[in-house]
Image: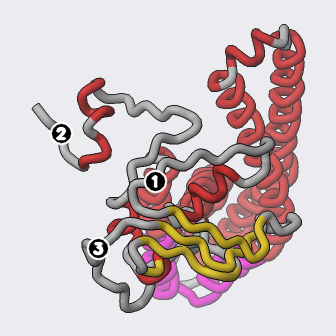
Amino acid sequence: MLSFASRFEDFTDNLVFNIVGSLVPLAFASVVLWRYDPLLVAGLIGVIAITGAGITPLIRRRQRLVDQREEAIARVSGHVADSLMNMDTIRAFAAEDREAAEHRSRVADQRRKSVRSWDYANLRIDALVAPMTVLANVLGLLLAVALGAGQHGIEAVIVAFTYYSNATKIMFEFNQIYRQLESSLTEAAQFTELLFTRPAVVDAIAPEPLRPTASDVRFERLSFAHPGALPLFTGLDLAVPSGTKLGLVGRSGGGKSTLTRLLLRMMDVGDGRILIGGQDIARLRQSDLRSLIAYVPQDPAMFHRTLRDNIAFARGCRRR
């Protein structure tokens, strides 16, 4: 997560120091060359424009290859994370060889797509940019010589050729700058998508204050279905008076954990409502609602902190 966030900084650095840092010398060169002859500026801008028009479709094609490469990298990372988290399960089913083969397959796919995106940049984009830089240098030299034959003399030849050489150097370095910018944008975009993902559960615009009354729980005409699945509950009515000990028994996937998540408002109900102490939980702040409930998850969660911090986590403070 932090590595993705840091890509915004990399993007800004590339934008300021590489792109803007390249445009400023080009602008300065155009001003100087204009004093000698506007034709020198027209030739320089023309070569850059032709190069840009030629590589634009190539860049779009390579971006698709980069997206495929990043997807393959994510598949490798996901498999590594799954293997580490479920190591005991893999061992219990003697699946080490199978998972190792799966890892090799994903790594091979990632390597193949990475090489294809790199080769496309080297063999297509560089193959266009390199001759255009040579053409720009030749054009600059010819224009400088033609201009030097006039009133400006050898001074115009040296100045024009120097600035054209500097401009073509920037053109030649473009692919490297683009790769750095592309890498920053690709990873920053993944983090941006996460930031702009709208939460599935939000507080009411004007939430009700929590009233310290009874703590009975009622499910009234509750209906719920997971996205793309059949309804799990339809018109469910359930009352749990204060102080009652209740156990839910049923087959796996029958909705026992879902009821708990609905009570915690990790998900919103489709129809009906859930009340605690007579208050609709959809009208409460989520933090107020969850402060009423002691929750022990089905899969134990441990933070990378001290045992004391883990035990006291529900209280929101560290006790000494």
Q: Which callout, 3 or 1, points to the residue nearer the camera?
A: 1
Specify the amino acid type for callout 3.
Thr
Please report whichever mark, 1 or 2, sits nearer to the chain's N-terminal start. Answer: 1
Q: Residue at x 30, y 33 (%)?
A: 311
Residue at which label 1 appears: 244
For the residues labelled 3 and 1, the Cα–Cα distance comes to 16 Å
Mark 3: few, some, or many residues within 10 Å (few <14, many ≥20)? few
Image-quadrant location for residue 268? bottom right
Residue at which label 2 appears: 318
Specify the amino acid type for callout 2.
Arg
Span of residues in magenta: 21-50
State whether the magenta stretch is mostly helix, strand or loop.
Answer: helix
Query: Residue 116: x, y in percent?
Result: 87, 42
Please report whichever mark, 2 or 3, sits nearer to the chain's N-terminal start. Answer: 3
Q: Which residue is nearer to you in this view: 189 or 1? A: 1
Please report whichever mark, 3 or 1, sits nearer to the chain's N-terminal start. Answer: 3
Q: Residue at x 69, y 82 (%)?
A: 271
Image-quadrant location for residue 317? top left
State whether residue 55 appears in this view.
no
Query: Residue 320: x, y in percent?
Result: 10, 31
Residue at which label 3 appears: 213
